[in-house]
C-alpha cells in the first residue's frame, strides 16, 4: 500500500508535450476508469490542468505499477512508449505524498501561491469520488492535502503573492489607460497565472476579449469561459493592432514577438498605447520592445518587483510553507503506518494481554485462599479465551487479501486500538 | 484699492502654491480641499481686481506688461478650474500653480501705473485680440504642466519603479487626452489671435503682417502646435513625443512673451 505519482508539469515538459498527455473533457472520465482498472492500481485520481498532468494511485509494487501506467498512457494518448520514459517524473511512498501536498499548496505551481490549483485538485478528487475510484488511502491523503493547502494559505503570505501579481497587473493597466471598458484584451496562450491575471482583468471590465492559442480548441474553450472570441494563433499579429492589453503565456521556447514586428504593429495602430504582460518562462516577448514609445512591457519578475521587492520575505514565507507541509506529511505517515498489519497484530495482542492481566489480577486478589492448582486453571482459561477471541482477526490480518488497509482500519476501530483512528 | 486686491490675490495664490507643493510629498483630502479653497479665493479676488481695474481705467486691462502677465495667470487659473471639474486630475495643482504664482510674482514686479491708452490701442480689436491670445497661451501653459505630469508618470511606468507620485498621478492616457484637448483648444485661439492681430495691424498700419519679433515668434509657436496636431492625427505621435513637443511650444511662448519684451523692439512695444 503505497502512494504513487506519475506525471509531468510545466517545469519538465513543454506545452506541446503536456497537451498530448492531457485528459480533457470526456477523456478524463474514460481515462480515470481505465487507469483504475489496471491490475496494479488499487486507487486512482487524475489531475489534468494546463500546467500539469498527474496520475495518483495506491499501488503495491511501484516497479510494476510504473510500467503498467506508462503503457496505459502511451495506449490512451497514442504516444510512443519510449518517449514517455524521459518525459515523466515518478514518486512513490513518502515522496509521492509530499509531492501531492506541495501541489495542493501551490508550492509546485508556475506562480507559487496561485489559488486555482487547489480547486482543480478538488475537482479531480470529486471526479474520483463520484466514479468510486479511490479508497481509504487516497481519500485520506486528499483530505490531508486540502487541509495542508488551507493551512499554507492562512498561515503564510504565499497566496498573497499570486493574487497581488494579478492585482498589480490591473493597477498598472489603470495607470496606463483611462477606462478599461473601452479596451480590447488579448490572451495569448494559457497557463495558471495567465488565466488568473486574465480573469482579474476581465473582472474589471474590458470591452472585448480575444483568445489565441496554438491549439484552436483550447482557444475556443477559453474564449467560451471568458466570453470572448477565439482566433488562430497565426493571426495574433493582426490582432495586436487592435489589442490594448495583452497577456502572453505560450510556452514557446523563443520570442514570438520582436522589436521590428512590434514597430510595424505600433505604426498600424497609430501609436496607441499598449500594455503587454509577458508571463511566459522563458520569455516570449523581446524585452527590447519596452524601449518603443507607448509600449509598456512587463514580465512576471517586473510585476513581482512591483508587488514585493523584498526577496528575503518571500523566501521566509516559502520556508514556512514547506514546514507546514512536513508537519502535515508526518501526521499522514503516522496514520498510514497504523494501517500496517504487523503493528496492528502486535497492538491487538498487547491490548488483549493487558485486559487479561488486569482482570486476572483483580480476580486473584479477591480469591486469596485458593491453591496453586486452581490459580493455574483460571489463568489457563483466561489465556485460552483471549487467544480464541483474537485468533480470527489475527488470521485475517495475516492473510494476503485485497483492501487490507480497510480491514486494518476496521479492526483497529472495533477493538479500540489507539493510534490515529479513521476519524473521518 | 486695486493694488490691495492684487496683493491679496497674490497672497492667496502663494499659499495655494505652497500647499500644492507639499501635496507632492504627502497629500490628503484635507490638503487638497485647503488648496482649492485658497486657489478659489485667490481667483475670486483676482477676478475682482481685474474688473476693478477695467472700471478704473475705462478700457480692458491688458495694455501693459503688468496687466498682461496678470491676465495670463488669471486665464490659467480659469482653465485649471475647468479642467479640475471636468477630469478631476490628481496633483494637477502641484504642476500648474507654481507657474501661476511665478506669473503673478513677475506681474507684481512690473509697473502697475495706469497710463492713458495710446491712440494706437484705442480699437475694439484690443479686447478681441488679447483675450484670444491669452486664453490660447494659457491653454498651452496648462498643456505644459500636463506634459510634465505625463513625463513623470511615464518614467514611473517605463522604468517599472512605481513609487513616488505613481499612485496619485492620473493614467497616461488621461494625461495624453487632456494634453491633446488643451492643444486643440489653444490652437484655434492662437490662430484667431494671429488673424485678429493681422486685421488690427491692417487697420492701424495698413499692413497685415510686419514681421516684428512678436509676430514672428507667434508664427513659430503656431507652427510648432500645428506640427503637434498634424503628427498626432497623421502619424499618431502621442504620449511622450506630444508631451515634449507641447512643452517646447510653451517655451517659445515664454520667449515670445518675455524675451522680446526685454529687447523692447518691434511694434508690440507697449506689451
Image (cartoon, grey):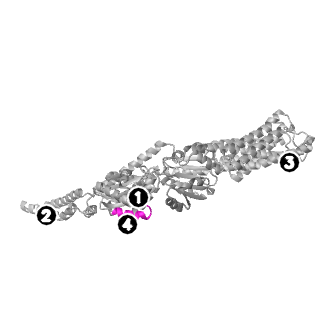
- Determine which residue is flagged by label 4: A131
* Label whose residue precedes the other's in the sequence (4 or 1): 1
**Does the magenta stretch mainly form a helix, a strand or a loop?**
helix
- Determine which residue is flagged by label 2: A384
* Alpha carbons under labels 4 and 1: distance apart: 14 Å
Nearer the camera: disc 2 or disc 4: 4
* Alpha carbons under labels 2 and 4: distance apart: 46 Å
- Asked whether the residues under marks 2 and 1 belong to the same chain, the reply is yes
x then y, percent, for residue A41: 31, 60
- Asked whether the residues under marks 4 and 1 belong to the same chain, the reply is yes
Q: For the magenta stretch, what is the residue range?
A: A21-36
- Residue B128's disc number: 3
* Label whose residue precedes the other's in the sequence (2 or 4): 4
Q: Is residue A22 above or below residue B223?
A: below
* Label whose residue precedes the other's in the sequence (2 or 1): 1
- Residue A47's disc number: 1
Amino acid at each position: 500500500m503505497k502512494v504513487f505519482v506519475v506525471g509531468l508539469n510545466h517545469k519538465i515538459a513543454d506545452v506541446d508535450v503536456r497537451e498530448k498527455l492531457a485528459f480533457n473533457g470526456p477523456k478524463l472520465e474514460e481515462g480515470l476508469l481505465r487507469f483504475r482498472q489496471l491490475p496494479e492500481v488499487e486507487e486512482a485520481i487524475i489531475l489534468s490542468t494546463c500546467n500539469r498532468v498527474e496520475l495518483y494511485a495506491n499501488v503495491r509494487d511501484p516497479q510494476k505499477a510504473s510500467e503498467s501506467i506508462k503503457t496505459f498512457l502511451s495506449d490512451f494518448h497514442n504516444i510512443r512508449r519510449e518517449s514517455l520514459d524521459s518525459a515523466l517524473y515518478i514518486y512513490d511512498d513518502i515522496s509521492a505524498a509530499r509531492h501531492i501536498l506541495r501541489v495542493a499548496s501551490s508550492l509546485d505551481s508556475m506562480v507559487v501561491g496561485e489559488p486555482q490549483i487547489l480547486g482543480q485538485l478538488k475537482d479531480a478528487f470529486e471526479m474520483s469520488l463520484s466514479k468510486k475510484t479511490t479508497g481509504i488511502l487516497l481519500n485520506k491523503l486528499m483530505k490531508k492535502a486540502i487541509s495542508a493547502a488551507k493551512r499554507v494559505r492562512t498561515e503564510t503570505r504565499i497566496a498573497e503573492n499570486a493574487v497581488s501579481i494579478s492585482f498589480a497587473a490591473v493597477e498598472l493597466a489603470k495607470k496606463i489607460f483611462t477606462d478599461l471598458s473601452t479596451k480590447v484584451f488579448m490572451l495569448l496562450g494559457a497557463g495558471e497565472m495567465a488565466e488568473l491575471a486574465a480573469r482579474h482583468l476581465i473582472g474589471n471590465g474590458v470591452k472585448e476579449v480575444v483568445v489565441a492559442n496554438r491549439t484552436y480548441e483550447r482557444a475556443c474553450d477559453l474564449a467560451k469561459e471568458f466570453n470572448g472570441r477565439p482566433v488562430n494563433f497565426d493571426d495574433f499579429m493582426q490582432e495586436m493592432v487592435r489589442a490594448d492589453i495583452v497577456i502572453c503565456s505560450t510556452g514557446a521556447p523563443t520570442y514570438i514577438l520582436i522589436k521590428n514586428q512590434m514597430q510595424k504593429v505600433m505604426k498600424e495602430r497609430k501609436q496607441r498605447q499598449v500594455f503587454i504582460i509577458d508571463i511566459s518562462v522563458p520569455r516570449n516577448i523581446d524585452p527590447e520592445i519596452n524601449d518603443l514609445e507607448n509600449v509598456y512591457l512587463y514580465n512576471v519578475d517586473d510585476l513581482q518587483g512591483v508587488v514585493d521587492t523584498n526577496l528575503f520575505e518571500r523566501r521566509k514565507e516559502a520556508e514556512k510553507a514547506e514546514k507546514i507541509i512536513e508537519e502535515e506529511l508526518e501526521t499522514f505517515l503516522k496514520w498510514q503506518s497504523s494501517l500496517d498489519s504487523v503493528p496492528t497484530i502486535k497492538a491487538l495482542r498487547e491490548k488483549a494481554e493487558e485486559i487479561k492481566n488486569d482482570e486476572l489480577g483483580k480476580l486473584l486478589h479477591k480469591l486469596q485462599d485458593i491453591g496453586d492448582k486452581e490459580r493455574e486453571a483460571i489463568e489457563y482459561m483466561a489465556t485460552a479465551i483471549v487467544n480464541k477471541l483474537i485468533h480470527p482477526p489475527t488470521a485475517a490480518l495475516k492473510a494476503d487479501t485485497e483492501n487490507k488497509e480497510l480491514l486494518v482500519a476496521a479492526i483497529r476501530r472495533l477493538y479500540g486500538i489507539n493510534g490515529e483512528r479513521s476519524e473521518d | 484699492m486695486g493694488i490691495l486686491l492684487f496683493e491679496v490675490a497674490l497672497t492667496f495664490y502663494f499659499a495655494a502654491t505652497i500647499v500644492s507643493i507639499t501635496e507632492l510629498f504627502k497629500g490628503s483630502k484635507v490638503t487638497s480641499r485647503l488648496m482649492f479653497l485658497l486657489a478659489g479665493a485667490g481667483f475670486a479676488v483676482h477676478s475682482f481686481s481685474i474688473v476693478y481695474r477695467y472700471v478704473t481705467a475705462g478700457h480692458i486691462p491688458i495694455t501693459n506688461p503688468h496687466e498682461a502677465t496678470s491676465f495670463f495667470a488669471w486665464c490659467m487659473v480659469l482653465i485649471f478650474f475647468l479642467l479640475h471639474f471636468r477630469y478631476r486630475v490628481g496633483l494637477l495643482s502641484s504642476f500648474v500653480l507654481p507657474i501661476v504664482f511665478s506669473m503673478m510674482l513677475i506681474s507684481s514686479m512690473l509697473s502697475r501705473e495706469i497710463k492713458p491708452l495710446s491712440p494706437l490701442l484705442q480699437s475694439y480689436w484690443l479686447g478681441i485680440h488679447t483675450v484670444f491670445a491669452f486664453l490660447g497661451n494659457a491653454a498651452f501653459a496648462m498643456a505644459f504642466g500636463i506634459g510634465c505630469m505625463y513625463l513623470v508618470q511615464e518614467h514611473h511606468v517605463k522604468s517599472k519603479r512605481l513609487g513616488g507620485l505613481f499612485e496619485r498621478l492620473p493614467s497616461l492616457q488621461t494625461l495624453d487626452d487632456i494634453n491633446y484637448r488643451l492643444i486643440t483648444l489653444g490652437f484655434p485661439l492662437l490662430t484667431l489671435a494671429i488673424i485678429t492681430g493681422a486685421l488690427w495691424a491692417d487697420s492701424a498700419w495698413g499692413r497685415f503682417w510686419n514681421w516684428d519679433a512678436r509676430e514672428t515668434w507667434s508664427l513659430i509657436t503656431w507652427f510648432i502646435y500645428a506640427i503637434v496636431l498634424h503628427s498626432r492625427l497623421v502619424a499618431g505621435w502621442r504620449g511622450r513625443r506630444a508631451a515634449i513637443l507641447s512643452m517646447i511650444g510653451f517655451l517659445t511662448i515664454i520667449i515670445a512673451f518675455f524675451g522680446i519684451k526685454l529687447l523692447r523692439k518691434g511694434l508690440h512695444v507697449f506689451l
